[in-house]
């Protein structure tokens, strides 16, 4: 694993400070969505999903809901995403990545980082562990709200895409540095401003 002890400690401190600064933004967006959801995205404000985190442990990731609610995920790892369930307002949230904002709470809890490998749905991750040898190594660090794989490969699902993501994630872990963090942060900002999200 790359990066010095100082790097990882500074990264965690930056995660906490930036996430605390973002909490008022999360509150403002949540307030706006509570109003807009009545007409364009009826259902719960938040979406909770079990993801695989650092050390292969399970945690509950929090997002603003962008799809019509269903009792449980039944999609297999290579099934396409159910785009017909994405609401019109949800499509905007996903394009701008505003749906990810509540995950700053996960960051403050110590379950995630602002930047790192994106956490996969827990059941899918367990399957990837059996089919992609290097997949386990991406869980040496906290998962991130954004990551090198997301800003270079875009949204990707399925076994082959996850192999490519794992390669990018391992490159991030091996080459961890302040310069790489800033590069990913900048590319994430560009993605948000140009609405290149999922």
Image: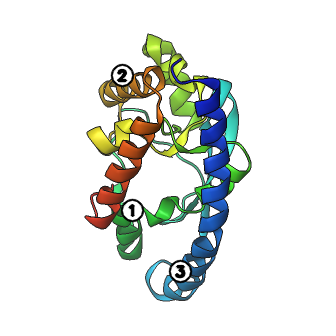
Pick the front one: 167 or 11? 11
The correct choice, above or below, for 114 with respect to 157 in the image is: below
Q: What number is the disc on residue 94?
A: 1
- Mark 2: which secondary structure? helix
Residue 97 x %, y %: 41, 61
Q: Is residue 44 visible?
A: no
- Mark 3: which secondary structure? helix
Give the distance between the C-alpha atoms of the residues marked 1 and 3, in whole angstroms. 13 Å
- Mark 1: which secondary structure? helix
Please identify, in this view, whether the residue under mark 2 or under mark 1 is nearer the observer: 2
The correct choice, above or below, for 92 with respect to 7 in the image is: below
Pick the front one: 6 or 89? 6
Q: What number is the disc on residue 33?
A: 3
Q: Can residue 88 be seen in this view?
A: yes
Q: What number is the disc on residue 167?
A: 2
Residue 80 figure quarter: top left
Q: Which residue is drawn at 63% across and 76% down?
A: 27
Q: Residue at x 53, y 29 (%)?
A: 125
Among numbered discs 1 and 3, the one appearing first in the sequence: 3
Among numbered discs 3 and 2, the one appearing first in the sequence: 3
The correct choice, above or below, for 170 with respect to 117 in the image is: above
Q: In which quarter of the image is the C terminus?
A: bottom left
Pick the front one: 187 or 152? 187
Crowd band around label 2 with a 10 angstrom C-alpha radius: few (<14), some (14–19), many (20+): some
Residue 182 x %, y %: 41, 45
Furthest toward the front, the residue is 6
Please identify, in this view, whether the residue under mark 3 or under mark 2 is nearer the observer: 2
Give the distance between the C-alpha atoms of the residues marked 2 and 1, in whole angstroms. 24 Å
The correct choice, above or below, for 122 with respect to 17 in the image is: above
Q: Which residue is drawn at 59% across and 23% down?
A: 140
């Amino acid at each position: 694993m790359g990066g010095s002890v100082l790097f990882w400690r500074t990264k965690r401190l930056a995660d906490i400070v930036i996430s605390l600064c973002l909490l008022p933004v999360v509150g403002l967006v949540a307030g706006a969505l509570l109003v807009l959801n009545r007409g364009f995205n009826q259902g719960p404000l938040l979406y909770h999903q079990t993801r695989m985190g650092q050390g292969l442990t399970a945690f509950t990731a929090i997002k603003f809901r962008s799809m019509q609610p269903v009792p449980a995920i039944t999609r297999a790892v290579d099934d396409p995403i159910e785009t017909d369930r994405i609401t019109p307002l949800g499509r905007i949230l996903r394009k701008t990545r505003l749906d990810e904002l509540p995950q700053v709470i996960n960051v403050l809890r110590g379950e995630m980082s602002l930047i790192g490998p994106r956490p996969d749905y827990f059941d899918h991750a367990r399957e990837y562990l059996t089919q992609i040898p290097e997949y386990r190594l991406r869980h040496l660090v906290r998962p991130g709200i954004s990551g090198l794989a997301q800003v270079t490969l875009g949204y990707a699902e399925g076994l082959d895409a996850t192999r490519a993501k794992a390669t990018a994630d391992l490159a991030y872990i091996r080459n961890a540095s302040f310069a790489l963090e800033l590069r990913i942060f900048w590319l994430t900002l560009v993605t948000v401003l140009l609405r290149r999200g999922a």
